[in-house]
Image (spheres, rainbow, N blue to C red):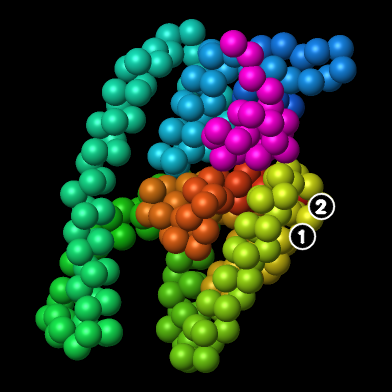
Amino acid sequence: MAYTVKKLAQWSGVSVRTLHFYDEIGLLKPARVTENGYRHYDKPELLRLQQILFYRELGFELKKIQEILSDPAFDSIQALKQHRKTLTKDLERTGKLIETIDKTLADLKKGKKMKDHELFQGFDPKKQKQYEYDLVNRYGNQVKSAITESKAKTAKFTKADWARVSTQWESILSDLSVQFKKGSAPDSKAVQAVVERHFRWLHRFWTPTAESYAGLGQGYTAPEWSKAFQAHDNQHPRLASFLADAIQVFSKGI
């Protein structure tokens, strides 16, 4: 049975404009296009989109996803098994983080005191260091300098500074969410205007280059960041991937 692009967008949460974008870059082509230009998708395309979304959730960039799915040796069943294995590993730590949130809420709202060290239960110090290591390993000393710069700048932040950048971040996410709901494409003028604000906002912390900014965009699709985006707008869990795609477009013009 064939499905329209509108129906596929409705089921997947991926906007029509983004599906068009995936078609344009060759990541997800429709099964057929009618004489009137309407795209139709069959079951193989639905399964391919599911793989794309799984890989995006796991932090892969579009170019890498395209390479993986285009490999003649790609096995969708083995890929799904690996996705399950990877996601299962996060369950225990996610459970601990939820427990930490519940305890903190009880501490703040109900006066049920928790031990100070419990505030950080579930956070993995080794993983925090691994994030920095991965960035440096991938982008070299340039990112190492950016990390050092960010630490130096935020060390001087006052409470008012943190409140200000937090408000600006929420405003960026809100405007991005509006464009996502409208079905705007990642490369549209409206979305790119929001991304430009985000790019300038980052200068409060460090000075991004085209390469490091693109890398940051892909970092947003990692499970930890994706959860933060979902907390902002849980009706649109693809918001992190949407921003990552838009950042890739913007980075090419830096």
Q: Above or below — where is 68 with respect to 85?
A: above
- Amino acid at pointer 2: Lys
Left or right, residue 142 beside residue 110: right
Left or right, residue 196 beside residue 59: right
Q: Identify the element where label 2 is drawn.
A: helix
Q: Which residue is mark 2?
A: 189
Left or right, residue 204 beside residue 111: right
Is disc 1 surrounded by few (<14), some (14 to 19) or many (20+) residues within 10 Å?
A: some
For the point 48% across and 55% down, which residue is it? 234
Q: Above or below — where is 124 with respect to 139?
A: below
Residue 77 in sight: yes
For the point 62% across and 65% down, which residue is it? 174
Magenta residues, dominant SS class: helix
Stretch of the chain drawn in magenta: 1-21
Cβ–Cβ below 8 Å for labels 1 and 2?
A: yes
- Amino acid at pointer 1: Ala
Q: Identify the element where label 1 is drawn.
A: helix
Q: Residue furthest top?
A: 72
Q: Nearer the viewer, residue 22 or 68?
A: 22
Q: Which residue is mark 1?
A: 193
Q: Nearer the viewer, residue 190 or 231?
A: 231
Is disc 2 surrounded by few (<14), some (14 to 19) or many (20+) residues within 10 Å?
A: few
